[in-house]
Image (cartoon, coloured by chain):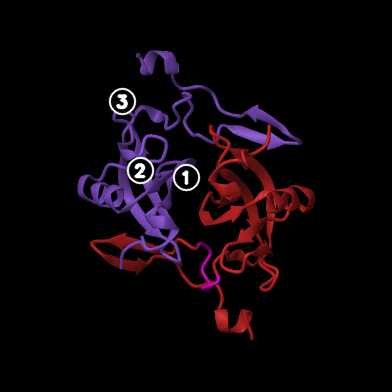
Chain colours: A purple, B red
Amino acid sequence: MEPDFSKNDGLLPAIAQNAGDGKVLMLGYMNELAWRKTIETKKAHYWSRSRQKLWLKGEESGHVQLVQEILLDCDRDTILLKVVQLGGAACHAGYQSCFYRRYENGRLDIVEKQVFDPREVYRK
Amino acid sequence: MEPDFSKNDGLLPAIAQNAGDGKVLMLGYMNELAWRKTIETKKAHYWSRSRQKLWLKGEESGHVQLVQEILLDCDRDTILLKVVQLGGAACHAGYQSCFYRRYENGRLDIVEKQVFDPREVYRK
C-alpha cells in the first residue's frame, strides 16, 4: 500500500507537521522519487516545482526535517509527515512555519516571531 | 492580500486542522469560489475535483467545519484552516482524520478509532 502516484500527474501534496507541538510547518509536493528518498533517508525530500528537481529540505539552510512518522489519507493521495525540524524553522522567510500569517478581511498579520534572519542563512 | 489563485490552475490545497488538539484532519482544494464561500459563511467549502462542483464540507453528513482561523503560507498558494469539526470526524470513512493510517514498509496500519459507521451516516 503505497501513495497513489497515478493521481495528480504523479505529484502529491505532502504536509510537514511538527512532531512536538503539532504545528503545521509547510506543504510541499512529492513525486515517487522524493517519496522513495524520504523513506530511505528518513529526511523529508520534496519535488521542487519551480526548479524541477529533487529537493532535500534543508540542503542549503541545514534545516533538515527528520521524519518520525508517515501517515496517508483515505485516498492515498496526500502524505502527512510528522517531523523534527532542525534549526527550529521550516520557512525560508525565517519563521517556524510557512503559515506565519493570519488572514482577516484581506489583510495578512504576522502571528509568529522570526527564528532566523534569511539573509544570514542564505548567503549567496 | 488574497491567496494567489493565478497558481495551480486556480486550485489551491487547503489543510483543515482541528483547532482543539491540532490534529490534521484532511486536505481539500479551494478555487476562488470555495474560498469566498468559506470567508462569507465561516464554514469550510472546497472544490470537489471528482464531482467538479462546489462542496460544503458536511453538506451530506452534517459534519461541517466551523472555521476559527485562516492562515496563508509564504507563497500564498496553500491555505490552512483551523476548524471546529462538527460530529468529531472529518473523514468519510468514519475517522476523526483522513490520515488515520500510518505507513511503514509498504504497510498501512490504522492508528485511530472509528468515530462513526459510514453506512449509517451516508444512507443512499
Residue that label 3 marks: A60
- Residue extending farthest to the left is A40
Subunit of label 2: A
Amino acid found under the numbered disc labelled 3: Glu
Q: Quadrant of the C terminus of chain B?
A: bottom right
Residue at 62%, 65% (x, y): give it.
Answer: B52
Residue at 41%, 56% (x, y): give it.
Answer: A9
Q: Quadrant of residue B123?
A: bottom right
Subunit of label 1: A
* Residue placed most toward the observer, A92 or B103: A92
Circle 3 packing at 10 Å, graded few (<14), some (14-19), many (20+), is few
Direction from residue A31 to residue A91 in the image, left or right: right
Q: Is residue A45 above or below residue A77?
A: above
Residue that label 1 marks: A22
Residues rendered magenta in the picture: B92-97
* Residue placed most toward the observer, B93 or B37: B37
Subunit of label 3: A
Residue that label 2 marks: A47
Q: Position of residue A21 (x, y in %)?
A: 46, 41
Q: Position of residue B97 (x, y in %)?
A: 51, 62
Judge if badges 1 and 2 mark residues of a common chain.
yes
Amino acid found under the numbered disc labelled 2: Trp
